Amino acid sequence: MFLRYRVLGTLDFTNLHYLVVFNTSGNGQTPYAPNIQSYVNYSFILVFGGTQAAGAAYAVYQVVNSGTSAGFQTVLLPQAPQYVTSFNANSSGTGNEFTFTFNRLLLTPLGGSTPSPAPSPTPVVIPTLASGVSSEWAINVFSADLNNNPIDAISNGGVSDVTFNAFVVDTLQTFDIPVNKPTPPPVQVSNLNAQVMAVEIINTP
């Protein structure tokens, strides 16, 4: 899976988080920015930038049930570089865009296992989804401060938009979905480095 993420200003991997949020439960419900505290419809969070991700780097968090009154919480997953094909922190050459290409097995639940093909006398296709992860994903993209308070989202309505659903996808199908905001964006934020302007997601099973 390939991700392209562009902002209006310049990417600030030191003071901001650039988030790609996944709902891999299969219910088809998009994870929205206002739910970042309750984690409703959140399965995994891919974080780019910020001190927790060591600057221009990435980290993957799984949202899990804490088993207490606190509800859900995030758990940092171990690095799995074998599932990351590339991370270009300046893919545009002008500092406003990054790209990230990964195997979908990067989103493997804690304690889960990656599937392997059963013995067969004929060639088989190696699965590219971890056990416990649906093939239907709902994805959203937004920027946040270092405390993960949302600043802007790819939807035209910004972080308050709870109607965006362009990235509800079947990961077993080939697709190329670009979403671009008009200039100037309908909802403007003061920090241009956090103003999300374009996101493209490409998938090849």
Image (cartoon, rainbow, N blue to C red):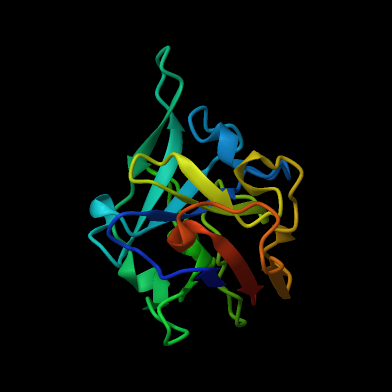
The answer to whether any part of residue 34 appears in the image is yes
User: At x 43% / y 84%, what residue is drawn?
Assistant: 94
Q: Quadrant of residue 64?
A: top left
The answer to whether any part of residue 131 appears in the image is no
User: At x 60% / y 76%, what residue is drawn?
Assistant: 125
Quadrant that contains the N terminus:
bottom right
Q: How many marks?
A: 0
In the displayed structure, does residue 141 sit left or right of residue 192?
right
In the displayed structure, does residue 96 sit left or right of residue 122?
left
User: Foreground residue, 73 or 104?
Assistant: 73
Seen as rendered, the residue at the extreme top is 69
User: Foreground residue, 169 or 47?
Assistant: 47
Where residue 3 sits: x, y (%)? 54, 71
In the displayed structure, does residue 83 sit left or right of residue 42?
left
Q: Is residue 78 above or below residue 101?
A: above
User: At x 71% / y 71%, what residue is drawn?
Assistant: 177
Quadrant that contains the C terminus:
bottom right
Where residue 159 sits: x, y (%)? 60, 44
In the displayed structure, does residue 73 sit left or right of residue 202?
left
Q: Quadrant of residue 188?
A: bottom right
Q: Is residue 73 above or below residue 31?
A: above
Q: Is residue 156 above or below residue 6?
A: above
User: At x 46% / y 20%, what residue is drawn?
Assistant: 71
Seen as rendered, the residue at the extreme bottom is 93
Where residue 181 sits: x, y (%)? 69, 65
Q: Quadrant of residue 15?
A: bottom left
